[in-house]
Amino acid sequence: MDPRLKVILYGNPDEELSLLMRLEKEKDYPDHCKIISDFGKVVSIRTQRRFLCSIYQSKKVKSLKAPSVVPANDNAELAPETQILDKKNDVLDDAVSNVVFGIIDFGFDFTHPDFISNGKTRFEKIWVQSDRYDGNRFGYGRIITKAQINEALLDEFPFKKLGYHPGKSDLFGNGTHGTHVLGIACGNGAVAPKSFAPNVPIIAVDMGTNLVNGSNLSLGDSVKGAEGLCLITNEAGERPLVINMSLGGHGDAHMGKTLFEQIIDHIVTTRKGTAIVQSTGNYHQSNAHTYGDIKLNQKIKIPWMFKKHDRTPNEMEIWYHGDDILSVDIYDDNMKLLLSSTPFKDELILKDNDEVGICLHRSNEPNTGKNQINILVNGKLNSKFWTIELVGRKVKNGRYHCYIERDDGGQSIFLPAIANKTHTTNSICNSKYSIVVGAYNQNDDSKSILSFSSSGPTADGRMKPELVAPGFKIKSSCSSSSRENRASNKLTSKSGSSMAAPYVASLVMKILEKEPDLDIFSIRKKLFKACDTASFKENNFEVFRAGHGYINPNKIT
């Protein structure tokens, strides 16, 4: 059973759970499931906790997953720079594009001039997933319509009128992630530099802060992300569609086999004129990944470093070949044994007779065929570091990958001496047919790839990211701060792969405006042919961060 599924196994039997499920056959569902979104063999469902085990054991079910956190990719730690223009630029209000732009992110400032045409909003829908429930078919959040936004724009206090303030968490006025990304992808040039897709209608999903199965997961999660994709694709109808997701954490198997990634591939391969563009992540220097090869009876020590006074939960995932068997011994900073595990047995981690965590071990995860160990540490931790010792009990392949999950409240790391920078793409960007983008410094003559931009390849050896785009101090639309009642003509600069991905998304929309029926294979081919080749004489590993090279808009035909 999926480790996260085990965590929510016990509790109120009547509580409704949100889950992702992969079926043996399309449309052949087990009992006691309410289907919310359908992507071929992968669906999102609701069910009561009392039915969880029977659904998991059903022969109709190939895989059942609890929600996993899907946070926004943080902007890199470079000081944002904001400015206010004296007046907005004149914009030619051309005809509405035939292509739709979908975005899953957070904080969309509908009052910003970059997203207003002739006094009317370019947003067709904004689904605020963390808002009060309005009766929509998904069972949570509020879906705001174009008419409601246009009515609010006429009010002196549009955020209050609509009951949605995109910058409620933006205390310092640096601008929200979603508005900045949106400006790069489809800003009309009123304030921010004009994008390649200035006239596209927008369908936005604000993931916000969510309560999931009784737990606060801080931002979005995989179920809500999947249902966001469902809303966007349904609302787009038959129109060409490009979706941007600058989202993702550290963990999972990095093989493109999560149910969320399978949904991505299903959408782009079954729907003509459709692409999903993703940022590769800003995790190249995060010290959150290590890998290696273990031999029979060998013991490999992996130091796990914690922040001083960290009271947040921490999680490590270990993925290894399905033909192998590993066990785990865990020691505290005084080399006191906390756990000597038994393969494929779930066991508590005890320190001085106090429960400080749990080690969950499963064999042959159904989507990857890999064995999986999750070490979950609660907030009672009072250690500087632990030593995780892997022991080779049965070894045919020997390769293992370890990931420390992202923790914005107190990130733990591997000892830098053993951390690896490859295979650090974000947790949901490894599918076969998404377009994954890294970031380079467009102000540097050498076009250096930015130090934080995550590196491939995937764990199964595929190229991700597939290209790089400008990502250094990118000026774009700045949302209203929590103290403002309406957007001013404000810009902000941010750096990250989150800024590179929407640049590429804008180019893909430009392609589809001319050729709306292109399939994803043709879109990818056209895009990658428009790249300038990257060459790295001093560091061959940089190729794992560059893919096909630097996107060149002038080469797109």
Image: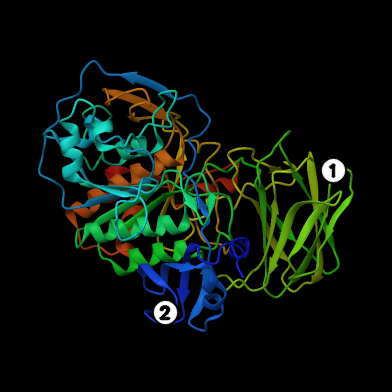
| Distance in Å between CA atoms under marks 1 and 2 | 49 Å
Q: Is residue 424 left or right of residue 372?
A: left
Count of number-bearing discs:
2
Residue assigned mark 2: 29
> What type is the residue that disc 1 sits on?
Asp
Tell me which residue sits at (40%, 41%) in the image: 500
| Closest to the observer, 93 or 519 | 93
Looking at the image, residue 480 sits to the left or right of residue 367; the answer is: left
Location of mark 1 (residue): 333
Residue at image x 70%, y 75%?
A: 323
* Image x and y of residue 67, in percent: 51, 59
- Residue 424 visible in rendering: yes
- Alpha-carbon neighbours of circle 1 within 10 Å: few (<14), some, or many (≥20)? some
Whole-percent x, y for residue 131 in the image = 36, 45
Quadrant of the image occupied by residue 451: top right
Task: Tell me residue 100's x, y (percent).
Answer: 23, 51
